[in-house]
């Protein structure tokens, strides 16, 4: 169990006009309201208490609502500010409900918590926004069931309990001017503001034994040394002090890498006879910023391997040896790995990396990149091979870096020599196949991922003057933040138009979307769509997990995957890519596919968080609107990473056929690729809504709207008629404009 460091508040309040809020019973609300000091800002509250219902009035200023030590849970709250004076700004708040987890931030007056019987608030976070946040701190603490009053939290910190089955019975809030002292403890029984289980609970399906779980932090699940392999795995994050989830991805020799499975869903295939050879685990949301997830596996015939963390690979893929047992542990961000007791192998990956015969180390061209002829120097470098050995130090005379190792590389180091080393820093990063770009490092630091089982397929370098330039911005340097993919995962897949990402649709917007869907349904066609703003992550969706035949809409994501790993393809296959993008010629698409194969798309699927089966089934594939949007979301990031990618983006701007471009191209810049066919084919109840397999009309892409960029994907069983999707496309844009 992780517990926040103790916060003991012992300072006395200075003499000042009262600005505090303590709320518990409705009875004292009127008395508290009478004592509101009009000259100072206040927090007003209405609360719902179990068996008592909502308070009838807004309560403020040392009044009470909810009763400590009563056994009655605080179920929901509404907050707002009063007496702000000339200050702009507002208040935001969110709650942890034990059976449901963290909710989103609520605006003033909105309900946070649960109005359902038996569900109570366990923890809260409260923060100010705008000018008032610059002038005041908001302090708050809760009375936790069976524990008593806890220490003060402030300005968005977590107060209360999570994952412990305890509810808050009462809460205090005080608004304190920045210049004043923090509030003194009041009847404090717990010296920390928050307590939580903060655990990852793991279940494993062991061949011949079935499902077994172990909820204790960092304990073993499975049977090490038994010879019985694990077939499937699932994990859930509980008791975290911030919102987030855990995702698991497993490898089987029979099926390859699975897609990422979230929040207790099964990765792998139980009762299949397939054995799990490797795994990856990562956190999502704010939990990924607060914690690291560490994990290790016990491999049949080898024993325990070393710890991996945050999406790295643990296990073996070549050869694929069965995993018998697993340990997963949650640690504070940046903390050391748990004790490496009992390891038989120091690295998290056993065996050779899984590569194709042409996956060589490559030739990476670079030069010092400066016209400062008075500064002499060279780049020296060395590469680490996937066989575990370092190559010799080399120089880039002639501007060429070609690591002299006979195997693929998984890391590199670079230095600047001579007078240049006194003037410049050399920054560099490596792209690891299936994982993405590493963070920027400089001057001899290591870039790559030793032991990941994946080779480096690209390197970027940049010079920066010492003490003048800060070096490359980390923004967009890696796709491991998964923000776009994770935010698209929030959307519901129901056959009702829904919003997500804290976007509240108006009735008019929802009616427009519903009418467009109904029009298609009334004509006998199925449809699924999703749209999300790429900055705010607000969006709308309908039937977004229904699977359709993708037709030529796969071409843009495939070309993006190729360019991400082979930037020279922009020049080498310019004619084929442009012909396939403008006119959708299958011949040109297949020429590029024959040249680069499925490997780029396999990695693209992993990076975008979609099923790798999409890559395996090329040249064509079946997928959902959510999956197509994720692939375009990954492409949107790529456009910002290189000039080759930006050129690819420009080739997506004026397609011959596209409902996105036809409907919105006169208003905004758009990048899209449609797919369509009306050739009939067999039927499958799980594809195209049960309609003929080769009767579809699809589109996906990026819209650079006036109020922000957004990703859109529409899949339908409409037989090759883009005009029939124009009404829905326009309604989706109206929804974005209204955000």
Image: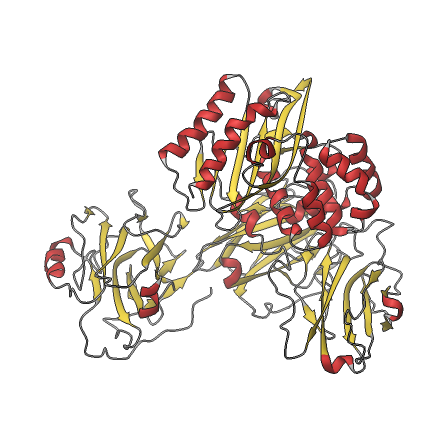
Count of numbered badges drawn on the protein: 0
Pick whichever, 620 or 577, lies toward us.
577
Identify the residue at image location x=76%, y=38%.
Answer: 578
Residue 340 x/y as whole percent: 64, 68
Say above or below: 579 vs 99. Answer: above
Residue 460 x/y as whole percent: 74, 62
Identify the residue at image location x=45%, y=30%.
Answer: 513
Residue 699 x/y as whole percent: 61, 33
Residue 265 x/y as whole percent: 54, 43
* Residue 209 showing in the rendered view: no
Say above or below: 662 vs 483. Answer: above
Q: Quadrant of the C terminus?
A: top left
333 sits to left or right of 340: left
321 sits to left or right of 675: right
* Residue 460 showing in the rendered view: yes
137 sits to left or right of 59: right
Quadrant location of residue 127? bottom left
Quadrant location of residue 86? bottom left
Say above or below: 105 vs 188. Answer: above
Pick whichever, 584 or 279, lies toward us.
584
Quadrant location of residue 443? bottom right
Pick whichever, 154 or 230, lies toward us.
154
């Amino acid at each position: 169990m992780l517990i926040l460091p103790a916060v003991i508040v012992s300072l006395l309040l200075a003499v000042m006009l009262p600005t505090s809020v303590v709320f518990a019973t409705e009875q004292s609300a009127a008395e508290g309201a009478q004592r509101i000091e009009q000259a100072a800002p206040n927090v007003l509250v209405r609360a719902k208490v179990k068996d008592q219902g909502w308070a009838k009035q807004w309560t403020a200023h040392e009044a009470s609502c909810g009763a400590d030590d009563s056994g009655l849970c605080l179920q929901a709250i509404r907050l707002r500010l009063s007496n702000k004076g000339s200050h702009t700004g507002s208040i935001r708040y969110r709650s942890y409900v034990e059976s449901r987890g963290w909710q989103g931030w609520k605006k003033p007056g909105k309900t946070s918590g649960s109005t359902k019987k038996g569900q109570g608030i366990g923890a809260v976070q409260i923060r100010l926004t705008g000018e008032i946040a610059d002038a005041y701190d908001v302090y708050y603490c809760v009375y936790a069931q069976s524990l008593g009053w806890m220490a003060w939290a402030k300005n968005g910190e977590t107060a209360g309990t999570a994952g412990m089955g305890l509810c808050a019975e009462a809460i205090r809030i005080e608004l304190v001017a920045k210049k004043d002292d923090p509030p003194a403890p009041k009847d404090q029984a717990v010296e920390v503001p928050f307590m939580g289980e903060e655990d990852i609970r793991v279940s494993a399906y062991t061949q011949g034994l079935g499902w077994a779980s172990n909820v204790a932090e960092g304990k073993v699940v499975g049977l090490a040394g038994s010879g019985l392999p694990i077939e499937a795995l699932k994990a859930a994050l509980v008791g975290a002090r911030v919102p987030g989830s855990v995702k698991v991805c497993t490898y089987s020799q029979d099926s390859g890498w699975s897609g990422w499975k979230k929040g207790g869903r099964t990765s792998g295939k139980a009762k299949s006879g397939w054995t799990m050879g490797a795994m990856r685990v990562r956190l999502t949301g704010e939990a990924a910023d607060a914690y690291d997830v560490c994990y290790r596996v016990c491999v049949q015939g080898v024993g325990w391997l070393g710890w991996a963390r945050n999406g790295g690979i643990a296990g073996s893929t070549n050869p694929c040896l069965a995993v018998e047992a697993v340990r997963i542990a949650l640690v504070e961000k940046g903390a050391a790995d748990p004790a490496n007791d009992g390891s038989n192998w120091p690295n998290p990956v056993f065996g050779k990396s899984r590569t194709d015969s042409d996956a060589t180390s490559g030739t990476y061209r670079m030069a010092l990149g400066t016209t400062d002829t008075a500064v002499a120097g060279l780049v020296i470098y060395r590469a680490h091979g996937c066989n575990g050995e370092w190559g010799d130090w080399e120089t880039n005379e002639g501007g060429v870096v070609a690591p002299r190792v006979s195997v693929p590389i998984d890391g590199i180091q670079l230095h600047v020599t001579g007078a240049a080393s006194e003037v410049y820093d050399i920054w560099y990063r490596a792209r690891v196949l299936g994982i993405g770009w590493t963070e920027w490092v400089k001057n001899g630091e290591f870039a790559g991922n030793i032991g990941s089982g994946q080779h480096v397929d690209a390197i970027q370098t940049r010079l920066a003057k010492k003490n003048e330039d800060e070096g490359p911005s980390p923004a967009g340097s890696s796709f491991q933040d998964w923000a776009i993919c994770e935010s698209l995962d929030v959307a519901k897949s129901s056959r009702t138009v829904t919003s997500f990402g804290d976007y509240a649709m108006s009735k008019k917007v929802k009616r427009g979307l519903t009418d467009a869907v109904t029009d298609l349904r009334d004509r006998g066609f199925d449809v699924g769509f999703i749209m999300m703003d790429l900055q705010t992550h607000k969006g709308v969706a309908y039937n977004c997990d229904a699977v359709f035949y993708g037709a030529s809409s796969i071409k843009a994501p495939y070309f993006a995957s190729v360019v991400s790993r082979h930037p020279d393809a922009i020049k080498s296959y310019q004619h084929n890519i442009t012909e396939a993008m403008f006119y959708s010629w299958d011949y040109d698409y297949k020429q590029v596919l024959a040249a680069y194969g499925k490997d780029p798309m396999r990695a693209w699927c992993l990076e975008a968080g979609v099923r790798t089966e999409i890559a395996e089934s090329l040249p064509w594939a079946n997928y959902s609107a959510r999956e197509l949007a994720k692939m375009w979301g990954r492409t949107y990031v790529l456009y910002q990473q290189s000039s080759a990618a930006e050129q690819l983006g420009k080739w997506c701007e004026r397609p011959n056929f596209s409902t996105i471009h036809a409907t919105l191209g006169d208003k905004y810049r758009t990048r899209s690729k449609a797919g369509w066919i009306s050739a009939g084919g067999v039927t499958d109840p799980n594809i195209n809504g049960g309609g003929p397999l080769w009767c579809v009309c699809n589109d996906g892409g990026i819209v650079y709207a006036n109020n922000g960029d957004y990703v859109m994907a529409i899949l339908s069983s409409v037989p090759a008629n883009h005009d029939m999707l124009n009404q829905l496309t326009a309604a989706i844009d109206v929804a974005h404009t209204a955000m």
